[in-house]
Image (tube, rainbow, N blue to C red):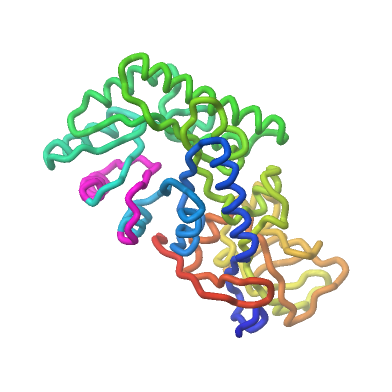
Amino acid sequence: MTLIPELPTPSLLVDLDRLERNIARMAGTFAAAGVGLRPHAKTSKCLEVVRRQLGAGALGMTCSTPAEVAWLQAAGLRDLLWAHAPVGPPKVAFVIDAVRTGGLTVALDSLEAAAPLSAAAHAAGVTVPFVLEVNTGHARLGVDPEHVPATAAALAALPGLRLRGLLTHEGHLATMPDRPSLEAAGRSAGALLARLADGLRAGGHDIDVVSVGSTPGATSAPFAAGVTEGRPGTYVYYDANQIRLGSCTIDDCALSVLARVVSVQRAGRPIIDAGIKAMSSDTIAAAGSVGRLLDSDVRFVDANEEHGFLLDPAASLAVGDLVRIVPNHACGTTNMWSHLYAVRGDEVVERWEISARY
């Protein structure tokens, strides 16, 4: 038996009790509402986690990158949604091959993005299923709502493409000033997408997918009448950002980085052996910290590549002490690592590989 203190530092850990609880809770909530759950694989990039999500009832997975699609297809998964624009010859060629393998739907938001894919699909004799991405407030990808009917009609008329429905990422919820405002914005995004889908059906389109997606919005947007599925990702681990947004408490956070104090030369400023290459620099400025320590009021205030700077006014930490840090953003942290250790209590249960990284 290996115990956590015997692991090298830094190491990435996932608490199995919390992981399993998070998966079961989200799956149960969606199932009770009759809404499909299509988790985002980018959060874990780990087949052991994906298998647990599917085993709990997820209808399929959402992917961000071609590497994630290829990885999950190689593992035998066939109900995949690639929620990114397949623009450029390499991505177009990849989509054609992935559609031949089976079970891939892509997201599009313009004629300019769709036309090369249509031409390649028509030439290859395949039909690419797609969802039209809609901007419901985040203003990243996505056609504005008033342009949905015309854009959907133009894309659906292209050879080699088949319109399945609508998709949005309600990422703007993370900017809401409080949880009630966030919940209201989530309900509004889901309701807007459902109304647009009804309009397309009235116009003669066969719409079977109305897909919303975010962890902050997972308690609101998927449950607007007419939404068919939700695509939360971070919920499987949660993180310090989700604590800040009220999506969870620190007791729900399954992912942590194990680090060790390596210096206390300056009083109240311990240095640990985990920096931005262990935590990622994602959202440090917004969060005002590099991560949040478990079971401690010590703050993680700054980092270099391999060193972390803690603020410990009580001088409670000494050289050699271990700390566990919940990252600000679980997805960004995952992408920094090639593997993690699954733990239960103080015991290390298994080592799990992380796949499809950049």
Please give left or right for residue 330 compared with residue 155 in the image. right
Residue 357, by quadrant, is bottom left
Q: How many numbered circles are shown? A: 0
- Spot the residue most to the right: 314
Please give left or right for residue 62 compared with residue 35 in the image. left
State the image coordinates of residue 113 (x, y, percent, origin top left): 29, 34
As for residue 315 lying within the magenta part, the answer is: no
User: Which one is nearer the viewer's eye here, 228 or 40?
Assistant: 228
- Where does the N terminus fall, quadrant-wise? bottom right
State the image coordinates of residue 106 (x, y, percent, origin top left): 33, 40
First to last magenta residue range: 74-100
- Residue drawn at x 79%, y 65% is 296
Residue 299 lies, with reference to residue 25, above or below; the image says below
As for residue 90 lying within the magenta part, the answer is: yes
- Does the image show residue 282? no
State the image coordinates of residue 260 (x, y, percent, origin top left): 68, 76
Residue 88 lies, with reference to residue 262, above or below; the image says above
User: Which one is nearer the viewer's eye here, 109 or 343?
Assistant: 343
- Residue drawn at x 70%, y 51% is 288
- Does the image show residue 134? yes
State the image coordinates of residue 153 (x, y, percent, origin top left): 29, 20
Please give left or right for residue 101 compared with residue 28 in the image. left
- Residue drawn at x 49%, y 35% is 212
- Where does the C terminus fall, quadrant-wise? bottom left
- Residue drawn at x 71%, y 31% is 180
- Spot the residue most to the top: 202
Residue 180 lies, with reference to residue 24, above or below; the image says above
